[in-house]
Amino acid sequence: AQKVTQAQTEISVVEKEDVTLDCVYETRDTTYYLFWYKQPPSGELVFLIRRNSFDEQNEISGRYSWNFQKSTSSFNFTITASQVVDSAVYFCALSEEAGSYQLTFGKGTKLSVIP
Amino acid sequence: DADVTQTPRNRITKTGKRIMLECSQTKGHDRMYWYRQDPGLGLRLIYYSFDVKDINKGEISDGYSVSRQAQAKFSLSLESAIPNQTALYFCATSDFSTSGGLDTQYFGPGTRLTVL
């Protein structure tokens, strides 16, 4: 079974719309970390956020916000007022204490923001 | 200058050839990783190294080998390249935080490898 599921393979939105990228994870560890990375068309991987399992506080950074809910094993990412520069593939990843903190990635969600 | 560099950035080679991908970092991190990315599959871990004397296989190590020449250098080799090793390869580094637990992995720019 996948440990990190990003059910949305591709999403298209019109500029200025809000969009939420879903991430559902599976782990038996009590200590784990969740990440989001952005991969723009240029190909590099850009770190966006890290959350540990003991901190369910939601976070906002500019137009980006993250909703971590242990009860549903989800770590969703919302972009408010999307811009063309947000077009990228977004990866959610899990790191578990029992797995020596190796990163397990979801398959990614390709976001296209249409002007 | 970039903290994590990869050379070459692009490489085209033929089946059966030996090829080495190199990764260098100036972040001072102990841990280094090699991943490959295939369309629709996300990133998968090939090998990782927690220090110069510690090398570990990842999810998909068959057909690959690695060498940790120094804290700052971690090389990935394909002894006899085959077409299904065509992929985008990423190197990453991380450290162990002083408060205990994981530090974030930071990625190099990637190497696009094509095996004909």
Image (cartoon, coloured by chain):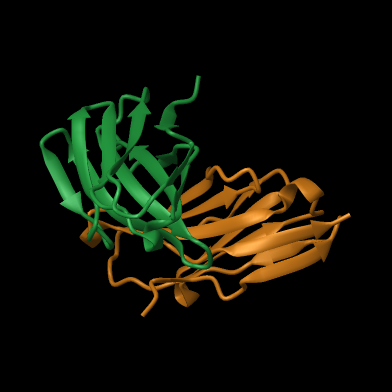
- In this view, the residue farthest toward the left is B53
Q: Quadrant of the N terminus of chain A?
A: bottom left
Horizontal arrangement in the rendering, residue B6 relative to residue A79 (left or right):
left
Q: Is residue A104 visible?
A: no
| Chain letter, colour green in render | B
Q: Is residue A58 left or right of residue B79?
A: right
Q: Nearer the viewer, residue A33 or A45?
A: A45
Q: Is A112 rendered above or below residue B105?
A: below
Q: Quadrant of residue A16?
A: bottom right
Q: Is residue B28 above or below residue A106?
A: above
The image shows a total of numbered marks equal to 0
In what quadrant of the picture does the C terminus of chain A appear? Answer: bottom right
Q: Residue at x 33, y 34 (%)?
A: B22
User: Residue A23 appears at what percent x and percent y?
Assistant: 53, 68
Question: Can I make out residue B30 in this image?
Answer: yes
Q: With A18 as the anchor, is B76 left or right in this view? A: left
Of all residues shown, which one is farthest toward the bottom? A1
Spot the orange chain and give its letter: A
Name the residue at the right extreme. A115
Q: Quadrant of residue A32?
A: bottom left
* Residue A61 image offset from top left, x and y in percent: 65, 44
Q: Residue A24 at x, y = what percent?
A: 49, 72
B113 in relation to A113, above or below? above
The quadrant where residue A22 appears: bottom right
Asked whether A19 or B98 is in front, the reply is A19
Q: Measured from the top left, where is residue B11 in percent x and y? A: 45, 41
